[in-house]
Every structure is written in structure tokens, then in C-alpha cells.
Image: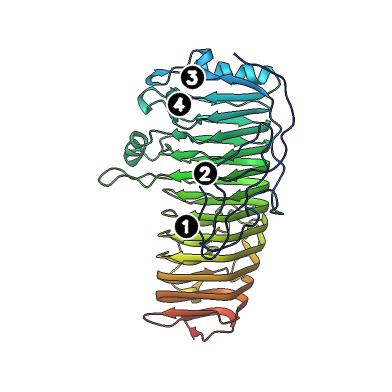
């Protein structure tokens, strides 16, 4: 069964399933932590480039500390698990995880096969490794033991990891169908890791959760690299609802080399010192902040992001009853294709008013949304429905937002309401097939021609 004691993880994380960019260079990889995670590939550029450091490897200054994982090994089949897609392996898998925890941590391996299971819990110093060819599958809705209990959980833990080249499957279709007729139905996430420190998720494929794929709340030093999230839904069946890719509230996050297709936000983030880089987002609601921002969001960097077919691109949302200070955000080197709303910032979530000239001024409170000090740089958007919406509050305007070398082409233009210090520089432009390129009301905008509402 299990062997060994514990040792420290060191080094970086190499991403899995490299992304391709234009004119770049093949990543040289990062260090491999003892008891850490090594994916295949990294991020690669176009043909003809020279070798350079992997932008998702340890040389990236945004990396955060990785978990310290025990050296013991615990194969779930040694505890009675059977990968036959029929046996309920909840007890066996939990026994392996518990043994690892009792040994001071270790690597719990799920080998090739399809392993059904109910809810399981990770302990300190433990890495759950889902091997290539392995599917860790949630029990079907009819036999899942507790609807509100997430599939893989940890709370108040430290040094935990989910890694490998396998798949986590949520069997979500029955849940989505039931939710379509009962919106009060409680549904489990695939992964919920809360109040924990030094968390790693790397290399895995996540699909078809009943609700969110990955839920990381109130954690410190979170690393998510080389994962694929693929839940587009099935034509003719109830669509996935609230199946966010990654929901994260963290102090320190490194999110790099990930590919996300989801039924809600591709990523929804809050916290401070958050990095999102070198990733691809398909169907989903975009790179999001909010709607609950009352604890504040700051020091966010989004760099080298490709988006195709998302509902929104850069998305920030809140309201007077749930807002807070959101500031010091930088979005750069972003390509959007067929994104409905490339830039969407609102203090009127979930429903926009129809006429900004009739928006009433309200007293500023502790939950008034504040959006300020935002830079969007080197962004190109084509095939969009609307160029964008910036809709602040009359009592608290969106302020100090710079579009730097931003070029957006859309069917209709951008609307900017209740905003100040909005600047378009270095050739930034909005091109609309019909109507005004930029319509404003109660807004100070420079660097582009504007039309009053």
C-alpha cells in the first residue's frame, strides 16, 4: 500500500498541452518539483522562433509557492478500487487519501480505468494524481449521496494538489435537466478547495460538472496550469447552467497555459495579486470579475489571452448591494474573435438600465462598486456584436481607464456612461458597421470621436 515519509516540493510547474502563438518560441520547460507536477509541452510559439524560457515556468515572476508533497505512494487499487465504470469506489479512494494524510502526505494515484466515486476529501501534503487513461467519475445523480457536497474537497488544508493527464467527469447532464425545471436544486461542484494554502491543479481535463468545475475560495498561493475544461453542452438537451470554469478568490494566483470552454464564466476572480496568462477561452461568459466585489479586487494581470466565441471578453460586473473597490488591473496582448462584448463593465448587474440620463444618484455606501486604474493594452477584437459597454454609477463613475493600442471592430459601437478619465491612446479605435463608434453620457473621454447619447 503506501510507502515513505515526506519531502519538500521544489522547482516550477511545466504546463500541459502547449498553446500556439504567432512568431514565438518553443518553451524550454520549467523545473519539476519533488512530489509536484510535470505536464507535457509548455507554451510554444510559431515556427522559426528560438528557444526561450517557458512563460508558464518558474522564470515567470508571477509564480507563487508550490505545495510541499509527501513522498509516500498510495495506489487506490491497493485499497480496493476497481476501474470498471460500475463499482462505487468512494470508500476505497478515501481510504487511500486518509492513509496518505496519516503518513504526513503523499501521492495517491488513480491508474488507467474509469473509477466511479462519491465525495472525497484531500488532506495536508497530499497530491491526487489521475493518470493518463484514467477517468475519475462522479456517481450519477440518482445515486450521488448529498447534492450540496462537492466531489473533491479540502477545507483549511495546506499543500494539496490535483494533477495528472487524466479526466474528472461530472456526469452533469441529468443535473442540468433537473435544474431546468427546478432552479432551487442544489448541485455539487467537481472541485471545491477552500481556506487552504499552496494549492496546485495541473494537467487534468475537467468536464460536465453538475455546477462549477473548480471552486477555489479564500485560498493563498494557488497555481493552475495546463488544464483543459470542456463543457460546451449537447444540442437538443438542457444546457449546462452555472458551470463556471474556475471561480477563484485568492491571495496570490498563477493561472497559465489553460484552455477553457464552459457554460458560464470561463474564469471569475476576486482577491489580490492574480495572474492569468497564455491561455485560450472558448464558449463561456469571459474573463470575469464579480458580481460580489465587496471584499475588493486588486493587482490583477491578464496577459496573452486568446478568446473565441465568448459572450464577453473582459467582463466586470457588480451592483450597489454587493460592490467594493476594484483597482490596479492590467489586460494586455489579447486577441478576440467573435466575442459579443469585448469590454463589459457595469455597476448595474444583472440588468442594465435603458437610459443613462435617467439614472438616479444614490448615496455612496460600503457596497458601492468602484472601478478605477484599469489599463487595456494591445487588444484586437473582430467580429463582435457590440464594441463594449462601460456603465458606471452617477455617484461613483468608472475612472482612469486607458485603452492603449486597442482596436475593436463590431456591428455597433461602444457605450460609455457615468465615467471619467477614459482615454484612447496609441492608435486605439472603435469601428462600428452602423451607428456611432462611441456614444457617451456623463462621461469624460479623450482620444476618440464621441457622440452624445
Label 2 to label 1: alpha-carbon separation: 30 Å
Label 4 to label 2: alpha-carbon separation: 18 Å
Q: Earlier in the sequence, mark 1 or mark 4?
A: 4
Q: Which residue is mark 2?
A: 227
Q: Secondary structure at mark 1?
A: loop
Q: Secondary structure at mark 4?
A: loop
Q: Nearer the viewer, residue 4 or 145?
A: 4
The residue at the point 40 percent across, 76 percent down is 412
Frontmost of labels 4 and 2 is 4
Q: Earlier in the sequence, mark 4 or mark 2?
A: 4
Q: Which residue is mark 1?
A: 350
Residue 376 is at least partly visible in this image: yes
Using a 10 Å C-alpha cutoff, classify the residue at mark 1 as few (fewer than 14 neighbours), some (14 to 19) or many (20 or more).
few
Q: Earlier in the sequence, mark 4 or mark 3?
A: 3
Label 1 to label 4: alpha-carbon separation: 44 Å
Residue 381 lies, with reference to residue 3, above or below; the image says below
Q: Residue furthest right?
A: 8
Frontmost of labels 2 and 1 is 2
Contact (Cβ within 8 Å) of mark 4 with mark 3: no
Q: Residue furthest left?
A: 236
The spot of residue 120 in percent (x, y) is 53, 24
Frontmost of labels 4 and 3 is 4
Residue 424: image quadrant is bottom right
Would residue 397 be found to the left or right of residue 451 on screen? right
The spot of residue 193 in percent (x, y) is 60, 35
* Disc marking residue 90: 3
Q: Secondary structure at mark 3?
A: helix
Label 3 to label 2: alpha-carbon separation: 24 Å
Q: Which residue is mark 4?
A: 112
Amino acid at each position: 500500500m503506501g510507502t515513505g515519509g515526506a519531502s519538500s516540493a521544489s522547482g516550477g510547474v511545466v504546463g500541459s498541452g502547449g498553446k500556439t502563438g504567432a512568431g514565438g518560441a518553443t518553451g524550454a520547460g520549467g523545473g519539476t518539483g519533488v512530489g509536484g507536477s510535470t505536464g507535457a509541452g509548455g507554451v510554444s510559439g510559431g515556427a522559426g522562433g528560438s528557444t526561450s524560457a517557458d512563460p508558464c515556468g518558474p522564470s515567470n515572476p508571477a509564480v507563487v509557492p508550490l505545495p510541499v508533497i509527501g513522498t509516500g505512494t498510495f495506489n487506490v487499487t491497493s485499497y480496493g478500487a476497481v476501474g470498471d465504470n460500475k463499482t462505487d469506489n468512494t470508500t476505497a479512494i478515501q481510504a487511500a487519501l486518509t492513509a496518505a494524510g496519516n503518513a504526513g502526505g503523499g501521492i495517491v494515484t488513480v491508474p488507467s480505468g474509469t473509477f466511479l466515486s462519491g465525495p472525497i476529501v484531500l488532506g495536508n501534503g497530499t497530491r491526487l494524481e489521475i493518470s493518463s487513461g484514467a477517468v475519475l467519475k462522479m456517481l450519477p445523480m440518482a445515486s450521488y449521496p448529498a447534492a450540496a457536497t462537492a466531489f473533491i474537497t479540502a477545507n483549511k488544508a495546506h499543500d494539496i494538489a490535483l494533477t495528472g493527464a487524466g479526466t474528472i467527469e461530472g456526469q452533469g447532464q441529468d443535473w442540468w435537466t433537473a435544474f431546468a425545471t427546478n432552479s432551487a436544486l442544489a448541485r455539487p461542484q467537481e472541485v471545491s478547495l477552500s481556506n487552504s494554502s499552496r494549492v496546485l491543479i495541473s494537467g487534468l481535463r475537467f468536464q460536465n460538472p453538475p455546477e462549477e468545475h473548480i471552486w477555489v475560495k479564500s485560498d493563498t498561493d494557488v497555481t493552475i496550469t495546463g488544464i483543459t475544461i470542456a463543457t460546451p453542452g449537447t444540442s437538443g438537451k438542457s444546457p449546462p447552467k452555472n458551470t463556471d470554469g474556475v471561480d477563484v478568490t485568492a491571495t496570490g494566483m498563477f493561472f497559465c497555459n489553460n484552455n477553457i470552454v464552459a457554460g458560464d464564466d470561463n474564469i471569475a476572480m476576486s482577491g489580490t495579486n492574480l495572474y492569468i496568462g497564455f491561455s485560450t477561452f472558448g464558449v463561456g461568459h469571459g474573463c470575469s470579475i464579480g458580481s460580489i466585489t465587496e471584499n475588493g479586487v486588486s493587482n490583477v494581470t491578464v496577459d496573452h489571452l486568446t478568446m473565441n466565441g465568448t459572450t464577453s471578453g473582459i467582463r466586470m460586473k457588480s451592483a450597489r448591494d454587493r460592490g467594493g473597490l476594484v483597482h490596479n488591473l492590467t489586460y494586455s496582448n489579447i486577441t478576440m474573435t467573435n466575442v459579443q462584448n469585448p469590454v463589459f463593465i457595469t455597476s448595474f448587474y444583472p440588468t442594465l438600465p435603458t437610459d443613462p440620463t435617467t439614472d438616479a444618484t444614490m448615496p455612496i455606501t460600503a457596497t458601492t462598486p468602484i472601478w478605477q486604474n484599469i489599463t487595456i493594452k494591445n487588444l484586437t477584437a473582430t467580429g463582435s456584436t457590440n464594441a463594449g459597454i462601460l456603465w458606471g454609477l452617477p455617484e461613483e463613475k468608472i475612472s482612469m481607464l486607458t485603452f492603449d493600442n486597442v482596436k475593436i471592430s463590431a456591428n455597433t459601437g461602444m457605450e460609455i456612461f457615468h465615467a471619467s478619465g477614459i482615454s484612447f491612446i496609441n492608435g486605439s479605435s472603435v469601428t462600428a458597421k452602423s451607428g456611432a463608434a462611441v456614444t457617451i453620457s456623463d462621461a469624460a473621454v479623450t482620444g476618440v470621436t464621441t457622440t452624445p447619447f
